Amino acid sequence: MSPEPARIPNHKRFLLTGAFLGLAVGIWFGLREPGGPSYSQTVQYSLSTAVLFLGALGAFVGAGLAGVLAILVDRSGRQH
């Protein structure tokens, strides 16, 4: 009996899922109530701009973390 071939993760799905989850977390952070009494005095961006920036940052970080996870899963699957 020959050993089963290693299952390789679908990196595209990992990246898209990580980006989507990161986007959701970034939007959630952007829509939260601001903390601190001086927020209204120091804010320079509108709410929609802040949500856009935090959503894009979350998508970028989420895709990066998902890419690292996909590589680790790929390596562990090839070693067995």
Image (spheres, grey):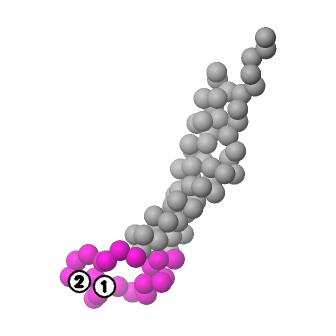
Apparent side of residue 12 relative to residue 31 in the rendered image (left or right) = right
Q: Is residue 53 above or below residue 79?
A: below
- The spot of residue 36 in percent (x, y) is 22, 77
Asked if residue 13 lies in the magenta stretch, the reply is no
Outermost residue to the front: 1
Q: Secondary structure at mark 1?
A: helix
In the rendered view of the protein, which quadrant contains the N terminus? top right
Name the image quarter holding residue 29.
Answer: bottom left
Q: Is residue 21 above or below residue 51?
A: above
Observer-nearest residue: 4 or 68? 4
Asked if residue 33 lies in the magenta stretch, the reply is yes
Residue located 52% across and 59% down the image: 21
- The spot of residue 19 in percent (x, y) is 58, 60
Residue located 35% across and 85% down the image: 43
Q: Which residue is mark 1?
A: 42
Apparent side of residue 29 relative to residue 21 in the rendered image (left or right) = left
Residue located 47% across and 71% down the image: 27
Magenta span: 31-52
> Which mark is drawn over residue 38?
2
Residue count near mark 1 (Cα–Cα under 10 Å), binned few <14, some 14–19, many ≥20: few
CB within 8 Å, label 2 to label 1: yes
Outermost residue to the left: 37
Q: Secondary structure at mark 2?
A: loop
Q: Is residue 43 above or below residue 78?
A: below
